[in-house]
Image: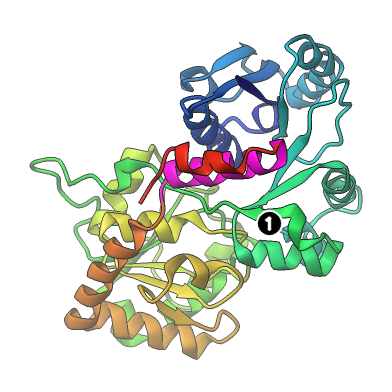
Amino acid sequence: MSLVVYDYQAFSLQEFGGVSRYICEIASRVGKAPGFDTRVIAPIHYNKYLPACDVAKTAWYLPPVFDRSHRLYRSVNRALSPLLISAVSPTLIHSTYYTPQVNRTHAPVFITAHDMIHELFSEQFGAKDRTSQEKRVSLSQADHILSNSQSTANDLMRLFNVPREKISITHLGYSEIFADAAPDGETAPRQQPYILYVGQRAGYKNFELVLRALGSSCALASAFDLMAFGGPAFTDVEIDLMRKLKLKTSQVFHRSGSDAALARAYRHARVFVYPSNYEGFGVPPLEAMASGCAVVCSNSSSIPEVVGPAARLFDPNELDSLRSALEEVALNNDVNASLVAAGRSRARVFSWDRCAAETVAAYQRVLGRPDAWEKAPKGA
């Protein structure tokens, strides 16, 4: 029986977040693959996903009691984790983020490279941010690297000179809540038809372009509101831009909430727009497609790899390109319906079961048992 141990890092960095969710999704599934046990060792953490994760744990949930509690958590975990990991004699260690770790065992170490944002957009991070330096060290020390996309793998090879044979592609999945049918009697979260944006908005996320596209199109501005789901409240800079574009504050609105609330927002949106200049994978377009929402997204980095032919692409550096794409998909019923159908089909290509199966296959190759791919759980 092979024991895979996942370390504390993602769980002492995030209360919620994509990296910790990813680890929970794959760890629970890898533990059900023939010949595998899994364990998360995160002595002190404040992650909301981990307590419900179906995996053996050495973990104590402790909500933050003061600002920057996570720094204390990381210090305690960094001291305790190597000892606790060594005590269970793992067959393989999966490091869940980029802080270089002490390995007191002879077990091979895996790490997942989620993106190369810190390298490609270094100006958007403070001078004291050491993520890129730590990432380079961690990746060089790892025995094998999992990449969420071919795009990120290409960046790893180009920017860090990582050998291709050291990388395996493991595309991400999405929660089944986004593929579920609407509950009986469900109503739209907004009476006025709306365009949906999801996630953080600053920097390379390029939200400002969406505001400018809406504000520069009489057809869009007269027919649609804009919902920004997730991320912080609107900044003064964003509000000032809305005012300059003559967008009413009631027309551009912010919402947040659970996955159920987000799924409802996707289901009733006329269009989902994703203007990001860069993504290591890009889960929101996948969620939107699964939910039956037409997708308009940038043609940058990994995004076309995820959406395939099932979305209307645009150049994220060109306002006219986005405005034209939104007008075409939002105002043309035939185009919209075609993208909805194509998106549902495309979303079925991805699943957490498939991600876990690809992960098991990579583990087995490093452990010298490549035939286990046939025994790993399969997705769509």
Outermost residue on the left side: it is 185
The residue tagged with tag 1: helix, strand or loop?
loop
* Magenta-highlighted residues: 351-367
Name the residue rendered at 69%, 62% in the picture. 153
Q: Which residue is mark 1?
A: 115
The quarter of the displayed image where residue 157 is located = bottom right
Tell how many labels: 1
Q: Relative to 178, does residue 223 appear above or below in the rendering?
A: below
Magenta segment: does it hold 362? yes
- Left or right? Give the position of 40 relative to 358: right
Identify which residue, 51 or 309, lies in the foreground.
309
Identify which residue, 308 or 355, lies in the foreground.
355
- Left or right? Give the position of 193 relative to 260: left
The quarter of the displayed image where residue 86 is located = top right
- Left or right? Give the position of 215 relative to 317: left
Within 10 angstroms of label 1, few (less than 14), some, or many (20 or more) residues? many
Colour scheme employed for the rendering of this structure: rainbow
- Left or right? Give the position of 297 relative to 114: left
Q: Is residue 153 visible?
A: yes
Main SS class of the magenta portion in the image: helix
Residue 77 rendering spot, x and y as whole percentages: 79, 18
Q: Relative to 218, does residue 256 appear above or below in the rendering?
A: above
Residue 90 rendering spot, x and y as whole percentages: 72, 20
Residue 224 rendering spot, x and y as whole percentages: 28, 71
Residue 195 rendering spot, x and y as whole percentages: 34, 67
Name the residue rendered at 79%, 24% in the picture. 74
The quarter of the displayed image where residue 286 is located = bottom left
Magenta segment: does it hold 106? no
* Badge 1 amino acid: Asp
